Amino acid sequence: MRDSSKVALREEPSGSSGGAPGADGAASPLNLDTVVAELRRSREVTHNIREGGIARRLPSSTAIAGIVEGLSAALFPTHYGQPELSGERIDGFVRGMLEDTLVALEEQIRRALPLGGDTAERDAADRVARDITTAFAARLPAIRALLVADLQAAYEGDPAATTVTEILLGYPGMVAVIHYRLARALHLLGATLIARLISNIAHSRTGIDIHPGAELGTSFFIDHGTGVVIGETAVIGDRVRLYQAVTLGAKRFPVDRDGILVKGIARHPIVEDDVVIYAGATILGRITIGRGSTIGGNVWLTQSVPPGSNITQAQTRDA
């Protein structure tokens, strides 16, 4: 952009006529037409970041947050829906909630697809979005079964938990896992952008960041939770328990001969069944934490450990 086209913006004191000072010290009027034209040129020509180079309607995080709320209400109607529901009224509520929510989900999926332009491409996007939504709806009973196992793990793993209602309504770890299970199903069906936005909503709400590409087994429990990070290619077995500020991250980021990051490679830990990882532990790289191991608080770990290990901060300092 030419220097002459740049506009200096500053707060003017009360009573000032506004504008930036010119070469002679006089105020120059702000020309918004120039700013708008230069921004249009940036969008359309010099810095166009649109997929396919064209503008299109994109998914709405606000709408997706509402969809997650609707799905949560359909899965747990008396907890996230209407507490006074009973008997046959529950089925009617669930049906109505799903009818509205799945229509909204299909629209958001359609917006996220890298399709558009002519009528044939739009029709193809509509069909793909409909197929993904239909397949996702069919998986909801299985998702609920996983969540009930997670809920039971939370109840059994936390002596402070008095009821499952307390966990559903008051545990950020459970909120994050609900978002993850929904996002994971959509990720596997190809709605990867929607899945990523759901995980970001969970991160904003709970401080827990679980990439939908990560593979989590059944009966998974995050206690307290704030600051937990689980990377894209992490694999976690059954009956695993994490505490706050645990990181399952990558140790390094390989680049190709042009210095560009290589994507899609397995770079996060594998955590086998029945592992407990305490607060502040950082586990990096494609290493394996063996079945039944315990990783102590604030441990920094970059090498695999065999099943049944008990790793403490003192051991890692001495290694």
Image (tube, rainbow, N blue to C red):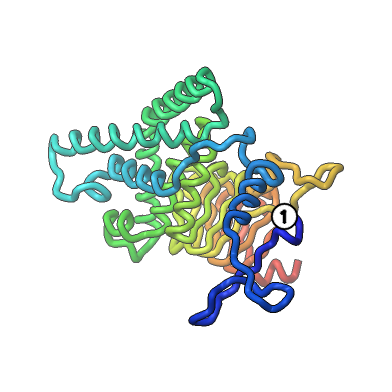
Residue 18 drawn above or below residue 262: below
**Measured along the vertical axis of the image, is residue 181 above or below residue 26?**
above
Residue at the image position 57 percent from the left and 68 percent from the top: 297
**Percent of width and height locating residue 97:** 26, 38
* Residue closer to the observer: 294 or 10: 10
- Left or right: residue 307 compared with residue 253: left
Q: Residue 146 sits in which quadrant? A: top left
The one nearer the camera, 157 or 82, is 82
Quarter of the picture holding the N terminus: bottom right
Q: Position of residue 314 (x, y in %)?
A: 67, 72
Task: Please give the name of the residue rendered at 70% of the width and 52% of the height, measured from the top-left corner.
Answer: 285
Q: Amino acid at mark 1?
A: Lys
User: Which residue is depicted at the point 34% across and 32% down?
Assistant: 103
Residue underneath mark 1: 251
Q: Residue at x 40, y 49 (%)?
A: 62
Residue 13: x and y in percent read 53, 81
Spot occupied by residue 225 in the image (x, y as percentages of width and height) = 47, 61
